[in-house]
């Protein structure tokens, strides 16, 4: 899905929106290199306007600076692999917008983004908690990446089904939530959560289950701590919960629950806002959207809803011949004139990393979307509660938590065996500690 944006094509893509001082929005002290051209890689959009506005914004930058900007959109499952190839070969895109901890894996291959991050944070009310966690090198004020936003995965549920099951709201405790799912199963309107190797949904469900019982992969010092009483309790719970699920969730990818929910086969799951808008904008499924509600994931034993948003995290590679141009492009895309229209175009799928954008009209246009506004305020993150490191990123990419829960749900392991195996696998990724 490559697209070459040049000065000529910018006129068609940007149109009248180019009017104004685009060049003035470029980061100070970043002179664009002579003869610069840029290639960017980022994950494919889940809502079409995301890509359209993103391309138009890149076109504005291309025209204002008289350079070429090429943007390639790739599948979610492919972005991690392509980032690794780029980092290990020292060739390829100048900048990549990857997921979550990606900049921490390749820290020694990246350009320092501190000047850009400090400029944007100072101008737009500061960076949100999760943005700072994913952007900064642990224990320092050095920025490795620039978070662009996070996609939350709260509960998505059919009000009519939950009411028919005898509930008026979603319980926040484990016992109550299990009773709800059991009741939904009895009326043949089941729940279901991804237990397959799904980048967003699989990791999101596994993390939610672990954190809601007070468990964590590593402790504050970065020591593997997954084999704990809390983890075993969560595994025992998931074994009971899985019995209420729609069949097939062991093999689910990121799109599977969307399809099942739209087909009236699934009545409670977790997902980003894209599912709701896909239903809302299709006359055939609009009645499902009207019956759909969003609720934060049950807290269980956690102090707040244990949800870590899937975060877009931009990085610039040292092999780039045009690092100033690459940094200036990312800064430009995060400026208000570009970011506000892009945020609105995503319909709430991505939540802002900078505090000033919380006032974007997208959050007040539809009450069912407002829940996604504060995703990046969460204290939780992939690798909680330890420092984000190569080890935590590798364990996440290796689906250590997902496969731990899947092995118990499928009956292949006892909770104790699964926790011990997860510990063994995690230690491989943290063996340098």
Image: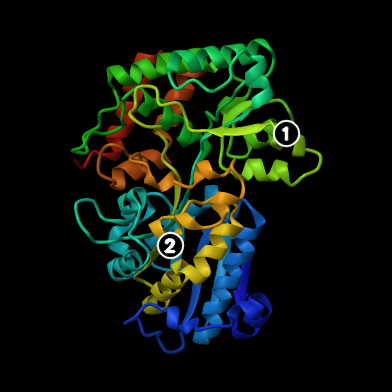
Q: Measuring from the top left, give residue 428's x and y in whole percent.
A: 29, 36
Q: Which mark is residue 288?
A: 1
Figure quadrant of the C terminus? top left
Q: Nearer the viewer, residue 377 or 108?
A: 377
Q: Label 1's element? A: helix
Q: Label 2's element? A: helix
Q: Nearer the viewer, residue 252 or 337?
A: 337
Q: Nearer the viewer, residue 274 or 303?
A: 303
Q: Nearer the viewer, mark 1 or mark 2?
A: 1
In the rendered image, is residue 299 in sight? Answer: yes
Q: Measuring from the top left, give residue 59's x and y in whole percent.
A: 58, 76
Q: Earlier in the sequence, mark 1 or mark 2?
A: 2
In the rendered image, is residue 348 in sight? Answer: no
Vertical order, 150 against 331 (above or below) = above
Q: Which mark is residue 86?
A: 2
Which residue is the extreme one toward the top? 186
Label 1 packing within 10 angstroms: few (<14), some (14-19), many (20+):
many
Label 2 packing within 10 angstroms: few (<14), some (14-19), many (20+):
some
Q: Residue at x 57, y 44 (%)?
A: 369
Q: Residue at x 23, y 33 (%)?
A: 219
Figure quadrant of the N terminus? bottom right
**Left or right position of 5 against 128:** right
Vertical order, 87 against 415 (above or below) = below
**Left or right position of 317 against 406:** left
Q: Residue at x 69, y 45 (%)?
A: 278
- CB atoms of marks 1 and 2 within 8 Å: no
Q: Measuring from the top left, give residue 244's x and y in whole percent.
A: 58, 15
Image quadrant where residue 116 sits: bottom left
């Amino acid at each position: 899905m490559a697209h070459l944006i040049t000065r000529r094509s910018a006129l068609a893509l940007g149109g009248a929106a180019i009017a104004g001082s685009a060049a003035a929005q470029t980061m100070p002290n970043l002179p664009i290199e002579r003869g610069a051209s840029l290639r960017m890689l980022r994950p494919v959009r889940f809502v079409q306007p995301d890509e359209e506005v993103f391309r138009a914004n890149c076109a504005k930058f291309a025209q204002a600076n008289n350079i070429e900007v090429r943007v390639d959109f790739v599948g979610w499952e492919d972005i991690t692999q392509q980032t690794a190839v780029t980092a290990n070969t020292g060739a390829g895109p100048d900048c990549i917008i990857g997921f979550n901890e990606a900049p921490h894996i390749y820290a020694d291959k990246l350009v320092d983004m501190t000047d850009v991050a400090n400029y944007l944070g100072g101008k737009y009310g500061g960076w949100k908690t999760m943005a700072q966690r994913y952007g900064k090198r642990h224990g320092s004020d050095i920025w490795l990446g620039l978070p662009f936003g996070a996609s939350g995965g709260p509960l998505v549920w059919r009000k009519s089904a939950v009411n028919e099951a005898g509930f008026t709201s979603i319980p926040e405790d484990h016992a109550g939530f299990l009773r709800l799912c059991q009741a939904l199963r009895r009326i043949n309107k089941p729940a279901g959560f991804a237990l397959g190797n799904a980048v967003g949904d699989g990791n999101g469900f596994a993390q939610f289950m672990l954190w809601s019982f007070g468990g964590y992969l590593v402790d504050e010092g970065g020591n593997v701590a997954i084999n704990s009483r809390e983890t075993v309790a969560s595994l025992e719970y998931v074994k009971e919960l899985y019995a209420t699920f729609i069949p097939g969730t062991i093999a689910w990818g990121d799109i599977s629950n969307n399809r099942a929910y739209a087909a009236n086969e699934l009545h409670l799951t977790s997902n980003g806002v894209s599912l709701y808008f896909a239903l809302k904008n299709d006359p055939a499924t609009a009645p499902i959207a009207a019956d759909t509600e969003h609720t934060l994931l049950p807290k269980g034993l956690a102090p707040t809803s244990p949800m870590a948003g899937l975060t877009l995290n931009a990085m610039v590679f040292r092999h780039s011949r045009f690092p100033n141009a690459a940094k200036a492009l990312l800064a430009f895309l995060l400026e208000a004139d570009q970011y506000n229209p892009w945020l609105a175009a995503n319909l709430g799928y991505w939540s802002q990393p900078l505090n000033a954008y919380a006032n974007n009209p997208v959050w007040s246009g539809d009450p069912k979307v407002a829940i996604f506004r504060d995703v990046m305020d969460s204290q939780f993150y992939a690798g909680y509660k330890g420092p984000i490191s190569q080890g935590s990123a590798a364990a996440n990419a290796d689906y250590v938590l997902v496969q731990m829960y899947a092995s118990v749900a499928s009956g292949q392991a006892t909770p104790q065996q699964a926790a011990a195996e997860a510990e063994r696998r995690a230690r491989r990724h943290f063996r340098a500690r």
